[in-house]
Image (cartoon, rainbow, N blue to C red):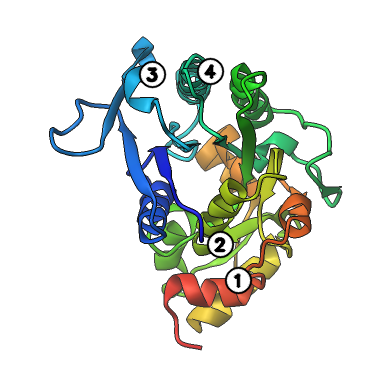
């Protein structure tokens, strides 16, 4: 990025947040992490506690961009009523507190980039989905609608609000791909269910660059699909990862086993299909480094071509 200023980032210790903070700082930005503990003296950390509605509001004055990535992981164990409520509350309460606080500053930030997810679209089979597509059904779609709606508190402040609907993030350092790698390296990888469900993915490198792109591009507003331009089926993804790691992928995990082991979470995260296209990113001139699944897997796993 050629522009710089002061950015506040929540979720700065997570997989995406760590890389984003590093990249912004390399680009000349001052970055103030928003942390859920007492800020360390002598650092630029800003303390907040979304569960109790507490935030150091005065420390947010003068920020140019705020990137909100914090939220409870959806993939940490089976979903029950308590777990689902925690997932919903972590996103809605945090976004509402942050957006509401920013809205009452004497000078709100120029742009507020808030994470969302392609779970907004639900399980839609082979239907091509863009930012203008309707929301889907199910728990994740419900969470994403409420999550994005919580940012509406900034609507009338002049702050540009961008909701990044993030797909499956590919990184060898964490997330879904990191959990798959040991299984695939042992030659035990295979498609899930029938394998025809679409996986809308994005390399971590490109996701960080996409967030920086929307910060720097005034015309980008509202929902933005943060995915690569070439979604693939689960079977295609499986074969590509096998080729990259030079391992067979002849195993198959039956859908009923996924449901038995992981319940509703497995159904939503592993068996549902979302064929999502990044219309706004492409039309705003974003250039991907890893638009091809095999190229992305090579880059993110460090495998030798």
Which residue position holds label 4? 103
Q: Would you say residue 122 is visible in this rendering? A: no
Q: Earlier in the sequence, mark 2 or mark 4?
A: 4
Q: Would you say residue 124 is visible in this rendering? A: yes
The residue depicted at 74 percent of the width and 54 percent of the height is 278
Which residue position holds label 3? 50
Which residue position holds label 1? 290
Q: CA distance from mark 3 to mark 2?
A: 29 Å
Q: CA distance from mark 2 to mark 1?
A: 7 Å
**Residue 2 vs residue 295, the one in the foreground:** 2
The residue depicted at 42 percent of the width and 77 percent of the height is 302
Which residue position holds label 2? 206
Q: Earlier in the sequence, mark 1 or mark 4?
A: 4
Residues under numbered marks 3 and 1 in contact, where contact means CB atoms less than 8 Å apart: no
Residues under numbered marks 2 and 1 in contact, where contact means CB atoms less than 8 Å apart: yes
Q: Earlier in the sequence, mark 2 or mark 1?
A: 2
Considering only vertical position in the picture, is 171 above or below 296?
A: above
Helix, strand or loop for disc 3: helix
In the rendering, at what x and y percent does residue 282 appear? Answer: 75, 59
Q: CA distance from mark 2 to mark 4?
A: 30 Å
Judge the density around disc 2: few (<14), some (14-19), many (≥20) Cα neighbours within 10 Å: many
Q: Earlier in the sequence, mark 3 or mark 2?
A: 3
**Residue 184 vs residue 101, the one in the foreground:** 101
Residue 260, quarter of picture: top right
Residues under numbered marks 3 and 2 in contact, where contact means CB atoms less than 8 Å apart: no
The residue depicted at 70 percent of the width and 28 percent of the height is 138
Helix, strand or loop for disc 1: loop
Q: CA distance from mark 4 to mark 3?
A: 16 Å
Residues under numbered marks 2 and 4 in contact, where contact means CB atoms less than 8 Å apart: no
């Amino acid at each position: 990025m050629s522009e710089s200023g002061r950015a506040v980032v929540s979720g700065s210790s997570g997989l995406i947040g760590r890389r984003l903070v590093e990249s912004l700082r390399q680009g000349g930005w001052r970055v103030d992490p928003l942390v859920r503990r007492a800020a360390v003296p002598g650092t630029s950390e800003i303390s907040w506690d979304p569960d109790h509605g507490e935030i150091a509001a005065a420390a947010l004055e003068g920020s140019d961009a705020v990137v909100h990535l914090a939220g409870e992981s959806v993939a940490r164990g089976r979903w029950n009523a308590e777990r689902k409520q925690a997932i919903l509350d972590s996103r809605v309460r945090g976004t509402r507190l942050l957006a509401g606080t920013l809205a009452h500053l004497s000078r709100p930030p120029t742009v507020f980039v808030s994470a969302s997810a392609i779970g907004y679209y639900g399980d839609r089979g082979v239907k091509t989905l863009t930012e203008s597509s309707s929301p889907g059904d199910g728990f994740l779609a419900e969470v994403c609608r409420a999550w994005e709606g919580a940012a509406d508190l900034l609507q009338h402040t002049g702050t540009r609000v961008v909701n990044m609907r993030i797909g499956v993030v590919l990184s060898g350092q964490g997330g879904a791909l990191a959990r798959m790698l040991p299984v695939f390296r042992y030659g035990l990888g295979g498609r899930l269910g029938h394998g025809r469900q679409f996986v809308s993915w994005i390399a971590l490198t490109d996701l960080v660059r996409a967030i920086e792109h929307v910060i720097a591009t005034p015309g980008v507003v509202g929902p933005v699909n943060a995915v690569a331009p070439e979604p693939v089926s689960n079977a295609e993804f499986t074969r590509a990862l096998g080729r990259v790691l030079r391992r067979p992928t002849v195993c198959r995990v039956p859908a009923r086993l996924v449901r038995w082991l992981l319940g509703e979470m497995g159904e939503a995260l592993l068996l549902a299909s979302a064929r999502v296209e990044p219309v706004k990113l492409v039309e705003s001139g974003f250039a991907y480094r890893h638009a091809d699944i095999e190229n992305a897997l090579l880059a993110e796993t460090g495998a030798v071509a």
